[in-house]
Image (spheres, grey):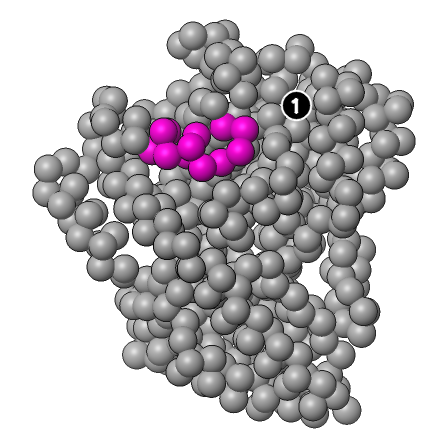
Amino acid sequence: MGRSAQLIERARHHIPGGVNSPVRAFRSVGGTPPFIVSAHGAWLTDADGNRYIDYVGSWGPMILGHQHPAVVDAVRRQASIGTSYGAPTELEVEMAELLCRRVPGLEQVRLVNSGTEATMSALRLARGATGRDAILKFEGCYHGHSDSLLVKAGSGALTFGVPTSPGVPADLARHTLTTPYNDLAAVEALFAERGRELAAVIVEPIAGNMNCIPPAPGFLAGLRALCTQYGTVLIFDEVMTGFRVHPQGASGLYGITADLVTLGKIIGGGLPIGAFGGRADLMSQIAPVGPVYQAGTLSGNPLAVTAGLTLLRLLDDPHLYDKLDTWTERFISGLREAAETAGVPFFARHIGSMFGLFFTAAASVDDYATVTSCNAAAFNSFFHAMLERGVYLAPSLYEAGFTSAAHGARELDRTLAAAAEAFAEVAKGAQ
């Protein structure tokens, strides 16, 4: 038995499922999750000494690759003078200034400890500011595991087939309305019926928790217009897309300004952090200046803020996003060619350095229904074939993947060679 296998057995005695986040358990794909001991650049190393080209990137934040020397040095320097204070620091001010300068619509921002905390707080603020209870989210979109949002959720909730989690009170869940992602007509009909009850519409501007689904033309603009008309707070959940798909996030990419934006992942440079912010009149409702209570003892942790500031400043490179887009297009094109050669029904897309892989004969995948009809068995076969060849993909057909600036020609060649063999295995298994 390998070291990773030993560790998962040991972990199951004291950690539910042996993992601290459900998708890591490999339940949907089967097999034993590799326990990672180190990472550098575009590569991971597991407890058995196996090396993998990493297309998860800690679920998004490693846009420059693992262990970027500037980030590591900055964290080391900060750790030498203090790891946590529970008191204000100049670093927090610098982070707030940088975020408000770069993200459309951010006039004020509050730092928190996770993306879940950011979306939970943004919704509380929207409810408090509007005096309304109902919220609208979209099928397959995941915004963290707070009670209001575990209704037809994506990510791990889709992976395990539990789109509405036990433990969510019915009285709370009834305030969460859902419509299909990318179906503006359904949203318009819901607003016509209940628009004056809606405190907020929360949406992933690019859905990354039912793989990678971009907004249909006019969808985000339609949400913006409806929210303005009905006095509803529009919340963009950019925990995944913020600074990943564009220097200004999806808000900048699509030219739509939300009332509130939630952030995470990259703004911590690989360390845990989150943030929510938006219009000053809304943010002024937050304690201590307003009545809507929100707090966090370790919010603005100096290590996380230092790592995030360092990384965000490195993203000022004017050529970085074009390079990431070009590399990812070569990667996706190569996968499409390999699948076609093997005769495997397959669709793939990318938005910048964020990508999605779909085992389907559909010409495009644009909604929850199409995602959930994809061939899970084919994905699982492909996933394990790639893992055996040293390529680490997200262990769920419902999760987006990510490339980084550390991925180069060597990684591309090795990945596509592995993919050619993996698609051939999938085709053989389907016969």
185 w.r.t. 372: above or below: above
Query: Can residue 158 be seen?
Result: no
x, y percent for residue 418: 52, 86
Q: Give the image quarter of residue 194.
A: top right
In the image shown, does 150 or 331 lie closer to the viewer? 331
The stretch drawn in magenta includes residue 52? no
Image-based side of 427 in relation to 81, left or right: right
Query: Can residue 186 be seen?
Result: yes
The stretch drawn in magenta includes residue 98? yes
* Residue type at numbered disc 1: Val
Image-based side of 198 in relation to 381, left or right: right
In the image shown, does 189 or 426 lie closer to the viewer? 189
Seen at 14% across and 36% down, the residue is: 82
Q: Give the magenta-colored segment's residue range.
A: 95-106
99 w.r.t. 314: above or below: above
Which quarter shows the N terminus?
Answer: bottom left
Seen at 69% across and 90% down, the residue is: 342
Q: Main secondary structure of the magenta part?
A: helix
Which quarter shows the C terminus?
Answer: bottom right
In the image shown, does 51 or 334 lie closer to the viewer? 334
x, y percent for residue 148: 64, 30
Seen at 59% across and 13% down, the residue is: 128
> Mark 1 packing: few (<14 Cα in 10 Å), some, or many (20+)?
many
Q: Give the image quarter of residue 77.
A: top left
Seen at 47% across and 58% down, the residue is: 321
223 w.r.t. 33: above or below: above
Instruction: Name the residue tied to disc 1.
Output: 233
x, y percent for residue 228: 73, 22
